[in-house]
Image (spheres, rainbow, N blue to C red):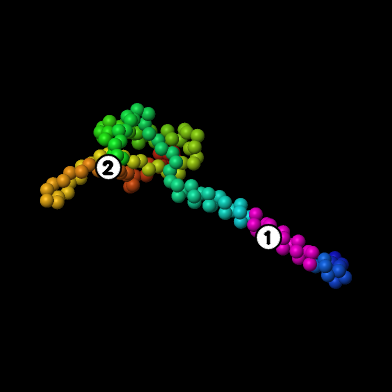
Amino acid sequence: MFARLVGESFVRNPRRILLAAAALAVGMAVTTAALSVALDVGDRLAREFRSLGANLLVTPQSDSLPLQIGGVDYRPVDEGAYLNEADLGKLRTIFWRHNILGLTPFLDSQADAYYVTKSLVTISVPLIGTWYEHDVGDCVRGR
């Protein structure tokens, strides 16, 4: 009965078919656009933020001031203070603790490099290293 009433209504006034089809098309377009924006914005922001790299640098409070001349750090290796690995668990007490995905500890120092031309030449180069095989993120995640 209902289907017959709707069918006769469309047959008597064909403009209603066009109006209903236009309303459905606009509704589907708006819904599709809203869903694609809502689902894609978070993914794009996460990708952009990951491409920028780390934004939190933790240094010891007792670290000495670096002496840099021409981009080279002339501070002795034993002058700087370092964080103990056992203290990395304290990162769970900061405000952004839920946003910490991992840790990468770095140790930078000066090293002497030797190479031979017609004589032995020594240059001082910065040496930066990390420990890739050791997962220090477990102490931050509380495992």
Alpha-carbon span between mark 1 and mark 2 = 57 Å
Q: State the residue at coordinates (57%, 51%).
A: 41
Q: x%, y% of residue 112? A: 20, 42
Position of 83 compared to 121: left or right? right
Mark 2, Cα crowd under 10 Å, few <14 / some 14-19 / many 20+, is: some
Circles 1 and 2: CB distance less than 8 Å? no
> Considering the image in quadrants, where does the C terminus appear?
top left
- In the image, residue 63 above or below residue 114: above
**Quarter of the image where one finds residue 135:** top left
Tell me, yes or no, whether the highlighted magenta stretch contains residue 55. no
Position of 124 compared to 5: left or right? left
Mark 1, Cα crowd under 10 Å, few <14 / some 14-19 / many 20+, is: few
Is residue 1 something that shows in the picture?
A: no
Q: Which circle marks residue 126 in the picture?
A: 2
Overall secondary structure of the magenta section? helix
Q: Secondary structure at mark 2?
A: strand
**Quarter of the image where one finds residue 34:** bottom right
Tell me where the magenta segment starts and ends, as one range.
18-34
According to the picture, the residue beneath numbered tag 1 turns out to be 29
Q: State the residue at coordinates (41%, 37%).
A: 57
